[in-house]
Amino acid sequence: MAAEVEKPEEVEVANEESKSSKALQAIGWLSIGIAVAALGIYIGTEVRSRSRFKKRTPYDFYAGAGEGEASEFGVGV
């Protein structure tokens, strides 16, 4: 007979390899997605902080001026 028949053991090994490769691909894509999201968040916060820094007003320079501690409320009667 000219037709070659694969042994069941070879078929099982091939199925396991394809399942593991798909799982590794899924893990790889997931890790790439998380890395891209983290990079996007980091770049977004940097851009936002720099744009806020450029839009300062003169009042922002003196926002921390004054008493270091809050005065007590309702003292003395």
Image: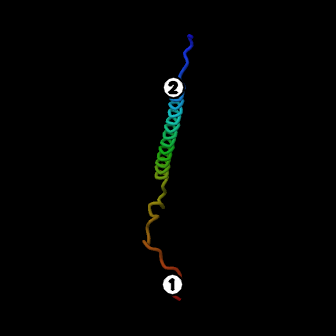
Q: Residues within 10 Å of mark 2 (few under 14, many from 20)?
A: few
Q: Which residue is mark 2?
A: 10
Distance from the alpha carbon under mark 1 to that under mark 2: 87 Å
Q: Amino acid at mark 1?
A: Val
Residue shown at the point (48%, 45%) measured from the top left: 38
Task: Name the foreground residue: 19 vs 30.
Answer: 19
Q: Give the colour scheme shown.
A: rainbow
Give the foreground label among 1 and 2.
2
Q: Residue 10: where, in percent of width, then height?
A: 51, 25
Task: Name the foreground residue: 4 vs 36.
Answer: 4
Q: For numbered disc 2, what is the local secondary structure?
A: helix
Q: Residue 29: where, in percent of width, then height?
A: 51, 37
Seen in the picture, residue 38 relative to 71 is either above or below; the reply is above
| Upstream in sequence: badge 1 or badge 2 | 2
- Total labels: the figure holds 2
Q: For numbered disc 1, what is the local secondary structure?
A: loop
* Residue 75, numbered circle: 1
Q: Residues within 10 Å of mark 1 (few under 14, many from 20)?
A: few
Q: Quadrant of the N terminus?
A: top right
Seen in the picture, residue 72 relative to 19 is either above or below; the reply is below
Residue shown at the point (47%, 51%) measured from the top left: 49
Seen in the picture, residue 21 relative to 65 is either above or below; the reply is above
Q: Amino acid at mark 2?
A: Glu
Task: Name the foreground residue: 42 vs 23.
Answer: 23
Residue shown at the point (49%, 79%) measured from the top left: 72
Residue shown at the point (47%, 47%) measured from the top left: 42
Q: Residue 63: where, in percent of width, then height?
A: 47, 64
